[in-house]
Amino acid sequence: MRFVTLILLVFIPILLMAQCPFQSFNGQNSLISSDRDGQRAWQPSTIETGDWDFDDFNYERDWKSEFVYSVEHPTVPIQIKGFAGYDHVGFQWLPKSYFNYTYNDDFSRILQVVFQDSVDNQPIQTISRYSYQYDDQNRLTVINTDLYQNPTWTPFKHLHLTYNNGYLTETVESAIYDSYVNYIRFTYEYDGLGKLITKQKYQNQDTLVWYASNKLQYTYQPNDTTTNDGFINYYSTTYPFIYPLVENSIYGFSSDYYGMVSLITDGLVFGVNYVPVNRNTYTYNNYGQLTEGLTEDYNSTVPIWQNRFKFTLTYDLDANPEYKYTTAWNSSTTSWENERRITFSWLDPTPTDDQVAPAISDLNLKAYPNPFQNQFQVNVSTKGVQPVVFEVFNIKGQCVQKLSGQSNSAICFDSSKLSNGVYLLKATQGKITETSKIVKVK
């Protein structure tokens, strides 16, 4: 049983726009836009997938997801159109499904998603809806899934999220089938830095006795800078967007991890015993971009880890993901064989976007690259005109570097004398301050 999916978009870097409910987490998470210059963002236009055709030695296009954005808020996606199969005679995609998103008044949270689909080549019809509830801290607490049985809605799934001391500690899902109700429970454990390290899965047909079934263990890159606050925000903003897509197995979307993860190990739990099943290893470049993933299955007889899948991710000149190539291991020929390709296309920010984009806050700063090696650049955007003072603090709270610059400008830091590790970058303009975590690597 493979508990971890490798279908991508959770790996794509995004930039939070003030009107767009999707947050950038450590530069490689999910979903809506890719940071280009620290102020504007590239937005996904389409995602195409295709399997490798061994007869034609080419990728056969079989699915496309197309993003539709709000006219009033051009950074907010309000619909994803799905197309199944490419008509090589008529040179067009065949419409298959629609996901329609409804937001709250300030477009900071998704309230509902309605899924429409064409089943067995029938006209497109309403299939299901996903409704979200949040607490007074804007944290996601409930997902209700209803099935449409004309003319009424019938409850199908209920997912409840529980928080304790600021951490997501448990999710419980109940699904109603014809003759029984199935329950699935996840518990979450964190390290001292607030990073998720264990996700334990339990199952049963009641909530009195839970039986452990799977356990995921997470290991992170040394320069990962994710925090628990970011993890909670991910579950409250990006996860509601992805959830219906993953539930309906739409190619190109996954929600399996958050942060700069280097290794995920999945295993079965039998009482107090843990048996590894598979593991996923992830590789990043010097800019923190995901470039490769390797899936291996555990052969307990030998015992040994054996190749199963591998993907490589390439980027265009604007640092946006362009292609994801998946290959499968052929043990007979001891070689990798082409299996699947995902193609990403992006919308270039336009003057219209800039005209309707919300005004910047009093003081915004962005360090690039992050992680960095011997130098990094800081772009600062402010409403004021006074000079801006930049300070770099180590983990002991000591100021190790200090520079000043003009507002709405860029300044370059020579960090060659700094030791590797995590630092806090602080910008001050008058009485206004802003901070950002930065990481130096070899």
Image (cartoon, rainbow, N blue to C red):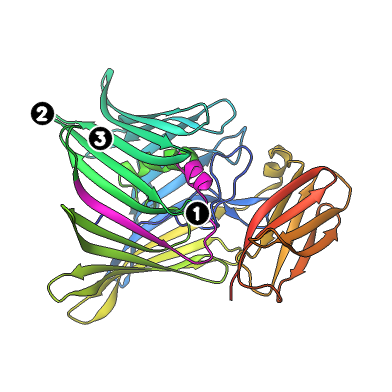
Amino acid type shown at disc 2: Ser
The mark lying in front, picked from 2 and 1, is 1
Name which residue lies at 61% across and 72% down: 420
Q: CA distance from mark 2 to mark 3?
A: 28 Å
How busy is the neighbourhood of tag 3: few (under 14 within 10 Å), some, or many (20 plus)? few
Residue at 52 percent of width and 54 percent of height: 226
Q: Position of residue 437 (x, y in %)?
A: 63, 56
Identify the residue at image location x=31%, y=73%: 57
The mark that comes first in sequence, 2 or 1, is 2
Query: Looking at the image, can residue 94 be seen?
Result: no
Q: Which mark is residue 193?
A: 1
- The amino acid type, in three-letter code, at marker 3 is Gln
The numbered mark, 3 or 1, whose residue comes first in the sequence reads 3
As helix, strand or loop, the secondary structure at mark 2 comes to loop
Q: For the magenta stretch, what is the residue range?
A: 212-235
**Image x and y of residue 224, in percent:** 52, 61
Q: Secondary structure at mark 1?
A: loop
The amino acid sitting under disc 1 is: Leu
Q: Which residue is mark 2?
A: 179
- 439 relative to 418, above or below: above
Q: Quadrant of residue 334?
A: bottom left
Category of crowding for the residue at label 2, using alpha-carbon neighbours closer than 10 angstroms: few (below 14), some (14–19), many (at least 20): few
Image quarter where the C terminus lies is bottom right
In the depicted view, which residue is nearer to us: 138 or 100? 138
Q: Is residue 258 magenta?
A: no
Residue for badge 3: 122
Q: Nearer the viewer, residue 121 or 115?
A: 115
Name the quarter where the N terminus is drawn: bottom left
In the image as oriented, which residue stretches furthest toward the right?
386
User: How far separated are the C-alphas under marks 3 and 1?
Assistant: 51 Å
Q: Secondary structure at mark 3?
A: loop
